[in-house]
């Protein structure tokens, strides 16, 4: 089959409008992955369910989204990239409206499943459509515009979600998607409908699709529920792990031998794609794990409110927003591996800075690493996406973007689960070691107990005060352990980047399927 003729770039004015439309849709999508987290107590209380039942609001979206993302390549060939993107945005708006109108947990979960499923193709297709709208020499700027929305949305999500829940009500975290989504869908259709990609009536790979649903669903539920159920001490987690492992093995075997696979796994035969995805997904997993642990530590053990924890972590977006356009401009004439190396070195530096945190740390010293990390965020996504898509013909970009985003999202779930579990396990160890020192024979502990007794505090209350102090110290030491390990992992990922051999700039023109 002959390769499709490449579309000319959009005119500058239309290109700017298309960038706004596609970025708004991406922003809305990414925002919804984190905005509900801080509103869970409000949602659970309003619907009359327990907090643990309420977490299915997050899990249901994550499972459906993880299943839908890698299907982007197949769906875009079947329905066309523009139709699929605009249709997904409109359905996302409808699902958001249904979420806000839900009067029971069952209805809300059903709406979140629909929302997660239709959200799947939006991020990969926004990436592909942006690349097509820009001329070859400005593709770095296209990736910069795209990455800025994916960087800022997760940071703003908890802050905006908390404010809306506190000042209005939790349905508004979903209602805000309606005007944004309708505007993005209308503008995208007006600008891009004449640029529709070619479609093919592909047969449905029913076996591959069923296996994908089974293993991804089992894996996502295992990651979401693992910490709550004490991981492999639970028979449910063992069963989910077994289903995920067997399902994954069967899925890979089937997809590599089927004539029309639902997910194109042959992309991993390309070193640029393989190592680029490993570096991006692992780096994102470690980063996201830290994003989860940091606010938890600040809120539970440092006395920060949810709003203040969000505001303290928000400065990560400052330098990221300022530097992303600069990185986009220099990318076409710079080796992207060098830029990605800067990202991992700065991530490591920030992690080691945090590994020295103590319980009496000033707010300014918490904020400083967040500001510096903005450099890493600006130099992380842009070069790694460029490396991953390097040498690919444009018609394979939606599929490659779908698969790489799926791996990244899955590693993000791994990172959040594993880092929080490690944090709690290390805290238990530190607590045991510190508690062993609290006795009347220890001069420091004895002095504290004697001092409280002199103030009229009874022995039981005095020990409770010491217990709280020991717990705070234990979790703070455990957070330092998590940050130190993160720094080591970031340094190790530098080597992975240099296993790639990218061509500069962007994916190849159609038909130009380079060997790497």
Image (cartoon, grey):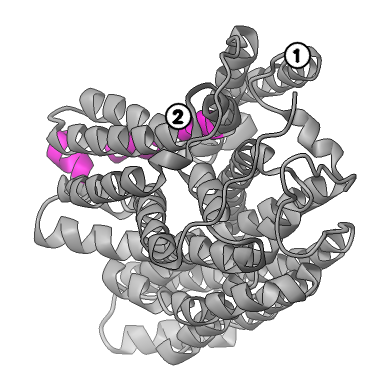
User: Does 46 lie within the magenta span?
Assistant: yes
At a point 58% along the width and 73% down the height, the residue shown is 378
Please tell me which of labels 2 and 1 falls first in the chain: 2
Q: Say whether residue 300 is left or right of residue 207.
A: left
User: x, y percentage for residue 340?
Assistant: 73, 69
Residue 203 or 219: which is nearer the viewer? 203
Q: Which residues are magenta?
A: 43-69
Q: Mainly helix, strand or loop, the magenta region?
A: helix
At a point 41% along the width and 71% down the height, the residue shown is 298
| Neighbours of disc 1 within 10 Å: few (<14), some (14-19), many (20+) | some
User: x, y percentage for residue 403?
Assistant: 64, 38
Q: Which mark is residue 438?
A: none
Q: Is residue 339 visible?
A: no
Q: Which residue is mark 1?
A: 254
Above or below 333: residue 417: above
Q: Is residue 466 visible?
A: yes
**Of discs 2 and 1, which sits in the foreground?**
1
Above or below 192: residue 495: below
At a point 37% along the width and 34% down the height, the residue shown is 88
Local SS, label 2: helix
Q: Which mark is residue 64?
A: 2
| Neighbours of disc 2 within 10 Å: few (<14), some (14-19), many (20+) | many
Residue 422 figure quarter: bottom right
Q: Say whether residue 240 is left or right of residue 467.
A: right
User: x, y percentage for residue 497?
Assistant: 82, 62
Residue 291 or 147: which is nearer the viewer? 147
User: Does 23 lie within the magenta span?
Assistant: no
Residue 305 or 177: which is nearer the viewer? 177
Residue 152 figure quarter: bottom left
Local SS, label 1: helix
> How far apart in space, not on screen, are marks 2 and 1 (Cα)?
21 Å
């Amino acid at each position: 089959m002959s390769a499709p003729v490449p579309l000319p770039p959009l005119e500058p004015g239309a290109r700017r409008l298309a960038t706004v439309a596609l970025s708004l849709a991406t922003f809305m999508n990414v925002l919804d992955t984190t905005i509900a987290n801080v509103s869970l107590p409000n949602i659970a209380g309003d619907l009359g369910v327990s907090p643990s039942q309420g977490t299915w609001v997050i899990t249901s979206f994550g499972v459906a989204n993880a299943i839908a993302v890698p299907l982007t390549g197949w769906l875009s060939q079947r329905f066309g990239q523009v139709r699929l993107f605009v249709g997904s945005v409109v359905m996302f708006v409808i699902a958001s409206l249904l979420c806000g109108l839900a009067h029971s947990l069952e209805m809300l979960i059903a709406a979140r499943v629909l929302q997660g499923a239709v959200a799947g193709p939006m991020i990969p297709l926004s990436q592909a459509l942006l690349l097509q709208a820009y001329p070859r020499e400005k593709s770095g700027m296209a990736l910069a515009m795209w990455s800025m929305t994916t960087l800022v949305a997760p940071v703003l999500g908890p802050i905006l979600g908390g404010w809306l829940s506190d000042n209005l009500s939790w349905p508004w975290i979903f209602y805000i998607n309606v005007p944004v989504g309708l505007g993005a869908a209308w503008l995208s259709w007006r600008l891009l409908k004449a640029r529709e990609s070619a479609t093919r009536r592909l047969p449905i790979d029913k076996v591959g699709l069923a296996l994908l649903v089974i293993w991804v669903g089992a894996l996502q539920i295992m990651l979401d529920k693992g910490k709550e159920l004490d991981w492999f001490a639970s028979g449910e987690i063992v069963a989910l792990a077994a289903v995920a492992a067997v399902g994954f093995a069967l899925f890979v075997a089937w997809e590599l031998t089927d004539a029309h696979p639902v997910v194109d796994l042959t992309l991993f035969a390309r070193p640029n794609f393989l190592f680029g995805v490993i570096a991006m997904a692992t780096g994102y997993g470690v980063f996201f794990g830290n994003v989860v642990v940091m606010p938890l530590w600040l809120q539970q053990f440092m006395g920060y409110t949810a709003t203040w924890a969000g505001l303290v972590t928000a400065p990560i977006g400052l330098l990221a927003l300022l530097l992303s356009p600069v990185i986009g401009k220099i990318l076409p004439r710079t080796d992207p591996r060098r830029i990605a190396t800067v990202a991992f070195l700065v991530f490591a530096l920030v992690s080691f800075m945090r590994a020295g945190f103590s319980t009496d740390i000033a707010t300014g010293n918490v904020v400083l690493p967040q500001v510096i990390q903005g450099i890493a965020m600006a130099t992380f996504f842009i070069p790694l996406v460029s490396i991953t898509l390097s040498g690919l013909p444009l018609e394979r970009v939606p599929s490659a973007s779908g698969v790489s985003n799926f791996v990244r999202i899955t590693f993000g779930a791994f990172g959040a689960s594993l880092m929080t579990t490690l944090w709690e396990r290390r805290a238990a160890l530190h607590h045991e070691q510190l508690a062993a020192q609290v006795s009347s024979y220890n001069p420091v502990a004895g002095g504290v107990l004697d001092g409280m007794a002199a103030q009229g505090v009874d022995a039981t209350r005095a020990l409770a005060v010491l217990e709280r102090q020991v717990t705070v110290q234990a979790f703070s030491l455990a957070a330092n352990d998590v940050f130190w390990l993160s720094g080591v992992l970031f340094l190790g990922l530098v080597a992975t980047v240099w296993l790639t051999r990218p061509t500069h700039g962007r994916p190849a023109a159609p038909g130009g399927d380079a060997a790497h």
